[in-house]
Amino acid sequence: MSQAHDIPARADLRTRLIHAGTPDLKDGAGPVNVPVVRTSTVRFADSAAQHRLQAQRGAGERVATYGRHGLDTHAALEEAITTLEGGYRTLLAPSGLSAITLVFLALLKPGDHALVSDSVYAPVRKVDRVLLAERGITVEYFTPGRDALESLLRPRTRLLYLESPGSLLYEVLDLPALAAQAREHGVLVAVDNTWGAGLHHQPLALGAHFSIQAATKYLAGHSDVMMGSVTASNVEHFDRLAATHDALGLAVGPDDAYLTLRGIRTLDVRLTRHQANATEVAGYLARHPDVVQVYYPPLPQDPGHALWQRDFSGANGLLTFAFAQIDPRAAGVFVDALRTFSIGASWGGYESLALEAAPERLGEHTGWPGGRSAVRLHIGLEHPDDLIADLEQAFAAVRERLRRSA
Ligand SMILES: *Cc1c(COP(=O)(O)O)cnc(C)c1O
């Protein structure tokens, strides 16, 4: 594996991220970036080399004996994400969702029970319905902070799966407390860390055994890659994942690995600007008479603000707001009126996006008061004044439409 050159291990994470996975120099020189190594086959010098490398791989070393294992480009990305998460090693998956599925399938057997926070990324429930329930694995959704974890644990509880902040309303969880309780009972803890992107939140340091990311979002950062990752805290937990990863044949293309690594180099500057822009927009929305609530943990009035301040070092461009008007059409009219924002799912790219946060999906979040129309915004890297002007004319369009049809 390539080594970061002479960066002190104690250097700031931002410094180490710039150099993680940089190729070694050969014969006194070499490129800044790892090459895109495209291959399905690994050639061996002779059969002795083949046997030696296969034995090394069998012993758990990061050695590729076949294209599916990923060569230098993949190894460099794994190293960068491992640096970001502060873990032992990372496995790549073709999407964030496949990384989540990998964790559930690797850790749970028929008869097992998993506890899942109720504000998770909605398709987790699809993994449950389509794959887990069918195999006799019971998933139970709970509201951290309201339901006492201790009272929900069963003899076959094997996994506590969390996402903090949650999707759509960004409920911030008390991860250190939840992880400590789970560990007392020998329950493994996995966290979807896509929101914090590793740079602003490190679940493994707060007690989780696995940290998952949809690298599709801020790591890749340019809306041009699908990528997932799971970082394990130690060798024992890594090995449990690795066997299932291998059996599922999960492989990602080297170009996508390269683009994700390239995104990581600018993660800090992009997130800083996403947060600055989103903070301006959140302030504008919080003062707007047509808005009843803004969900953005950096806002002092957000219910998760104190935990966010304690456990996170920054935020990003995601926020959701609920309309003051109690009219189910408001969100649809609003997003249709936007011009600079596009309508679209996913987030983490440089562009601003808007999405109706459908109340039926929010209904699964206990933090949702109900009865409102809501919109999720991803605040991109455009100038915030232009974004606010676009939002302003969309609010006017909603008022006009609701007035005409009153
Ligand atoms: C988008 C997202 C995922 C899924 O990632 P894909 O790469 O789109 O499959 C998982 N978790 C969270 C929190 C997400 O926002």
Image (tube, helix red, strand yellow):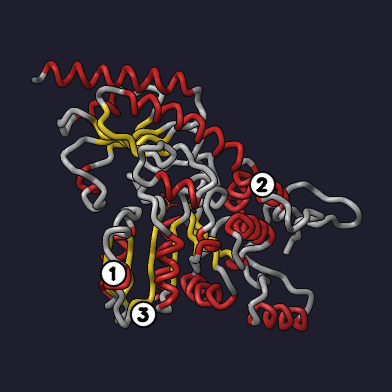
Of all residues, the one furthest to the right in this rendering is 28
Q: Is residue 347 above or below residue 323?
A: below
Q: Which residue is mark 3?
A: 109
Q: Earlier in the sequence, mark 3 or mark 1?
A: 3
| Residue behind mark 2 | 14
Tell me the quarter of the picture where residue 106 sits: bottom left
> What's the CA distance linking mark 3 and mark 1?
12 Å
Graded by Cα atoms within 10 Å as few (under 14), some (14 to 19) or many (20 or more), the crowding at tag 2 reads: some
Q: Please state which of residues 24 and 44 is positioned toward the viewer in this rendering.
A: 24
Residue 297 placed where, x, y %?
41, 42
Residue at 26% x, 73% y is 134
Element carrying mark 1 = strand
Element on which disc 2 rests: helix
Residue 139 is labelled as: 1
Q: Residue at x 83, y 50 (%)?
A: 30
- Between disc 2 and disc 3, the foreground one is 2
